Image (cartoon, grey):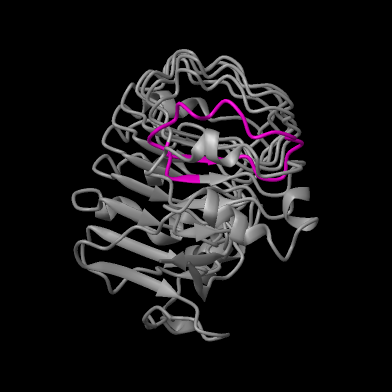
């Protein structure tokens, strides 16, 4: 066998697909919403800002005394709204609106209620919003997707409680200190992102609708997996880059397919017995010492245990659906277990073992030995192989 096509070295702390653990807004940004119909988009290009149409101003002679007095008493909020103007003045009723990086700090300046009969997707990413006004968001009862990623929101309050058709909510990279209670009102919710906030515990999920399929809480300050018994239809749970010390309280998640708890403080692989539908397990950058506790997880396809303290390749010979095994940067001294543990798993196409003593102590012969032990594998570490 010969090597072909060198691949870029992947980062062990980043799961394939959509794992979020590194705290970088670009690296962990949730999937963008694909447009389906016409939409209004307002984006900064350099320092140039889209300007609303100029409205003719009356001359001083046309102003009454009452008008002049009212102008003198204008509040700071009213002044700010006046400065921003009606940012969507020229747009018709749209099903999608995207206002990206537009320096918006005042929602009333958007006059969102006028879109209540048509709006299904609203993106307010990378602005300066500190709160959501119920008077502005309350009428948007047809909304299905709401994205307020990268703002300064500390609490959602009751602004979303009428959005019974909302399916996707992204409040990542904000200042939340707790999971908002209002999500229990979102009876159609399927996916929610609370990445990179200041959330310290998993709570307020008792009334969450059973429609919820994906919960992303990466990059917070969570120490314990708890209060998730109500999430009986959850398929994906993302908890990377927190302070979790134990795998526990997962038994109710019978439909879970993806579990990601990278970059935490876990020392033992346990508590997964009930997760019989689990397909992808990401536990890199922890302190796990042994591979164990996977007897019932027969559907596993991807296991990422890179950057742990594992000294032996064991207890995975029964995982005959495995396609990828990442066990790089551990303490495995030799390759003797490769054939008995993995030689018969012909679905396996990718294995990462670099950074172990078995590689660092035998750099010249390591790769050839892996290929001879696992001839069906098409990628070893960052390089493809072929017959």
Vertical position of residue 231 compared to residue 117: above or below: above
Q: Would residue 58 appear left or right of 357 to someone viewing this image?
A: left
Work out whether residue 69 can be spotted. Answer: no
Residue 124: image quadrant is: bottom left
The percent position of residue 70, horizontal first and vertical second, equals 53, 61
Is residue 315 rendered magenta in the image? yes
Q: Which residue is at the front of the view, 5 or 212?
A: 5
Q: Would residue 198 appear left or right of 345 to someone viewing this image?
A: right
Vertical position of residue 244 compared to residue 156: above or below: above
Residue 275: image quadrant is: top left
Quarter holding the C terminus is: bottom left
The percent position of residue 89, horizontal first and vertical second, equals 32, 70
Q: Which residue is at the front of the view, 257 or 378?
A: 378
Counting labels gives 0
For the point 42% across and 29% down, the residue is 278
Vertical position of residue 202 compared to residue 167: above or below: above
Is residue 157 rendered magenta in the image? no
Q: Would residue 369 appear left or right of 386 to someone viewing this image?
A: right
The percent position of residue 99, horizontal first and vertical second, equals 42, 65
Q: Which residue is at the front of the view, 311 or 163?
A: 311
Vertical position of residue 246 compared to residue 240: above or below: above
* Secondary structure character of the magenta stretch overall: loop
- Which residue range is magenta in the image? 301-324
The percent position of residue 351, horizontal first and vertical second, equals 54, 50
Work out whether residue 206 can be spotted. Answer: yes
For the point 40% across and 73% down, the residue is 42
Q: Would residue 242 appear left or right of 8 to someone viewing this image?
A: right
Q: Which residue is at the front of the view, 88 or 24?
A: 24
């Amino acid at each position: 066998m010969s090597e072909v096509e060198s691949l870029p070295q992947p980062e062990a702390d980043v799961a394939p697909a959509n794992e979020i653990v590194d705290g970088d807004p670009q690296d962990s940004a949730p999937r963008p919403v694909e447009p389906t119909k016409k939409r209004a988009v307002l984006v900064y290009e350099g320092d140039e800002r889209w300007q609303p149409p100029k409205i003719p101003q009356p001359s001083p002679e046309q102003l009454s005394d009452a008008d002049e007095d009212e102008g003198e008493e204008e509040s700071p909020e009213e002044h700010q709204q006046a400065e921003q103007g009606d940012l969507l003045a020229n747009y018709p009723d749209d099903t999608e609106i995207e206002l990206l990086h537009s320096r918006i700090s005042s929602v009333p300046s958007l006059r969102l209620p006028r879109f209540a009969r048509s709006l299904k997707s609203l993106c307010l990413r990378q602005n300066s919003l500190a709160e959501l006004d119920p008077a502005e968001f309350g009428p948007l009862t047809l909304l299905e997707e709401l994205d307020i990623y990268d703002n300064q929101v500390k609490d959602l309050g009751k602004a979303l409680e009428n959005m019974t058709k909302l399916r996707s909510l992204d409040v990542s990279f904000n200042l939340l200190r707790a999971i908002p209670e209002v999500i229990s009102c979102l009876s159609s919710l399927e996916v929610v992102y609370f990445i990179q906030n200041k959330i310290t515990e998993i709570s307020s999920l008792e009334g969450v609708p059973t429609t919820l399929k994906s919960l992303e809480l990466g990059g917070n300050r969570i120490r314990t997996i708890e209060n998730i018994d109500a999430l009986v239809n959850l398929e994906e749970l993302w908890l990377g880059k927190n302070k979790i010390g134990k795998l526990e309280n997962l038994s109710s998640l019978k439909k879970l397919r993806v579990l990601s708890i990278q970059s935490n403080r876990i020392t033992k692989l346990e508590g997964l017995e009930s997760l019989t539908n689990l397909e992808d397990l990401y536990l890199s950058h922890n302190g796990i010492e042994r591979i164990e506790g996977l007897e019932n997880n027969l559907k596993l396809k991807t296991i990422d245990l890179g950057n742990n303290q594992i000294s032996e390749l064991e207890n995975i010979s029964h995982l005959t659906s495995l396609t990828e095994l990442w066990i790089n940067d551990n303490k495995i001294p030799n390759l003797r277990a490769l054939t008995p543990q993995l030689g018969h798993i012909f679905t396996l196409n990718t294995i990462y073992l670099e950074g172990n003593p078995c590689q660092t102590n035998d750099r010249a012969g390591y790769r050839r030995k892996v290929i001879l032990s696992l001839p069906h594998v098409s990628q070893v570490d960052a390089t493809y192989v072929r017959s």
